[in-house]
Amino acid sequence: MVDVLSPSAENRISNSDFTPPLYYRQNRTSTSNFDGNGSGMFSQTVEYALRAIVFLADKSPEACTTDQISAATQVPKAYLSKVLQNLGRNDIVRSQRGIGGGITLVKVPAELTILEVVNAVEPIERIHTCPLGLKSHGKNLCPLHRRVDDAMESVETAFKNTTLAEVLAEPTGSPPLCNPPAQIKRKPA
């Protein structure tokens, strides 16, 4: 009987022989703060975008400055600026310079879904062909990858069916953002 778990030369796989599937490799260098320790399903960029959009939805239709959003969501201003630029390019937010300007949502919160926000910064990628590149599998996913894709489909559907207005209206003891800062600094008039 051959022990398939033994480290014999014929059974060993070196790190250079294995490349993790694309869905696993993506965004593993960035950390997520959904649970505070970096093990969330989505990247930090997605989380920051969601924080900013929930804050803007809560303030809608009022315009907010990047400083206000950064302070309330605890997102570094430089990173937030890049996230907001990306959201602007994807018609999620608009910015207005000058007195009375700031960042606002393009749609009302009741018409903007979580999926639209997520897909604007890092689209959810479904598995359409074997992530291991096995020609024998092709588009016929193995049971493991079929289940992973089914899970991604469930997340996609849940996000598609949830608007920002629903998130804000949900009765809970926990607000959808981090603890509000003691005081948000406002620009002098």
Image: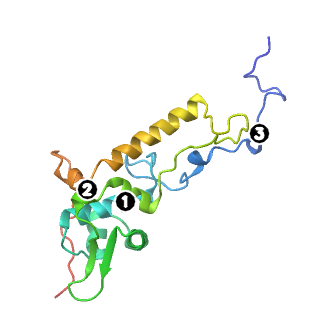
How many residues crowd mark 3 within 10 Å: few (<14), some (14–19), many (20+)? few
Where does residue 143 sit, x and y in percent of width and height?
A: 57, 28
Estimate the spatial distance between the alpha carbons at disc 3 and disc 1, rounded to whole Å. 39 Å
Q: Quadrant of residue 11?
A: top right
Where does residue 79 sit, x and y in percent of width and height?
A: 42, 69
**Secondary structure at numbered mark 3:** loop
Q: Earlier in the sequence, mark 1 or mark 2?
A: 1
Estimate the spatial distance between the alpha carbons at disc 3 and disc 2, rounded to whole Å. 46 Å
Q: Earlier in the sequence, mark 3 or mark 1?
A: 3
- Which amino acid type corresponds to the residue marked 2 in the rendered image? Leu
Residue 182 seen in the current view? no
How many residues crowd mark 1 within 10 Å: few (<14), some (14–19), many (20+)? many
Q: Are marks 1 and 2 in contact (CB under 8 Å)?
A: yes
Q: Quadrant of residue 80?
A: bottom left
Name the residue that disc number 1 marks: 117
Query: Is residue 28 depicted above or below 65 in this figure?
Result: above
The colour scheme of the drawn protein is rainbow
- Which amino acid type corresponds to the residue marked 3 in the rendered image? Ser
Name the residue that disc number 2 marks: 164
